[in-house]
Amino acid sequence: MTDFKFNGSTLIVKINEEIDHHTCDLIKNKIDLAINFRNTKHLIFDFTGVNFMDSSGIGMVMGRYKNMHKNHGTVAVVGLKPTVKKIFTMSGLFKILSEYKNVEEAMKSEVKMA
Amino acid sequence: MKDTNVMKLEFLSKSTNEGFARVAVASFISQLDPTVEELSDIKTAVSEAVTNAIVHGYENTIGKIYITVKIDERNITIEVKDKGKGIENIEKAREPLYTSKPQLERSGMGFTIMESFMDKLTVRSSLGKGTTIVMKKRVN
């Protein structure tokens, strides 16, 4: 299950399942639909509900980043569990996106940065 | 008597089985009472190996994947085997960020994760015959 919330030009994507090769195709498609549904400038991934992620998740986040970056948008992430954070750190994802304590803080910082 | 144990799994190369495989292995390993981090590392490594077999070994056709897990005191050996197309260049496949299927948004981090989350990783592959990945980890 993935929940979507729009707040102005910000899209908050809350993923509530394990992210692997099996689940990530559907998640990707839904996110891309949501991004294109409105003129999204900021994408915030809420990982509070993600207890497992393998390297498929890296590809998923990277792909969304590329799409957002093309349109001068930003990507941020909140709610990383230690095991998921380990994958983010190892793959260098923090070089392209920032982690925030919660959605509110991410909204404030990302919107200000743009 | 040494404390040893073995389990074997055989299942179809359907992506829905990725979750099943890592949970089944984690459940078997839990008799060693590993830490949350150790268990999560093993689950991730198994997920990578099984995904490789499905995406690259069988290229999304249906074949069988075989997993054997051996416990020898605190040492775990996990073997993930497929009878798919095999890997042409193992060295290249193991390089971080290398992917033979860039169009699929694969990160190319599978082997790197297996290597760093486990203590030892061995890859045996033969073109047209399949690939066997052996991973070892000692839990404290």
Image: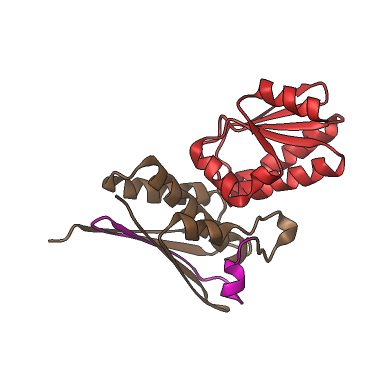
- Compared to A14, does B133 lie above or below? below
Q: Is A36 placed left or right of B64 in the picture? A: right
Q: Is residue A96 magenta?
A: no
The region drawn magenta spans: B70-96
Quadrant housing residue B78:
bottom left
- Compared to B115, does B87 lie above or below? below
- Compared to B8, does A4 lie above or below? above
Name the residue nearer the viewer: B34 or A96.
Answer: A96
Percent position (x, y) of residue A77? Answer: 65, 34
- Compared to B30, does B105 lie above or below? below
Who's the residue at 80% across and 34% down the image?
A35
Name the image quarter holding the C terminus of chain A: top right
Percent position (x, y) of residue A8? Answer: 82, 21
Task: Identify the hue of chain B.
Answer: brown
Question: Among all residues in the image, which is located at the extreme left?
Answer: B1
Who's the residue at 56% across and 57% down the image?
B51
Name the residue nearer the viewer: A84 or A36.
Answer: A84
Name the image quarter holding the N terminus of chain A: top right
Q: Is residue B78 magenta?
A: yes
Percent position (x, y) of residue B122? Answer: 45, 70
- Does any portion of residue B121 appear in the rendered image? yes
Percent position (x, y) of residue B19? Answer: 50, 47
Quadrant housing residue A41:
top right
Q: Which chain is red?
A: A
Who's the residue at 27% across and 55% down the image?
B74
Quadrant housing residue B118:
bottom left
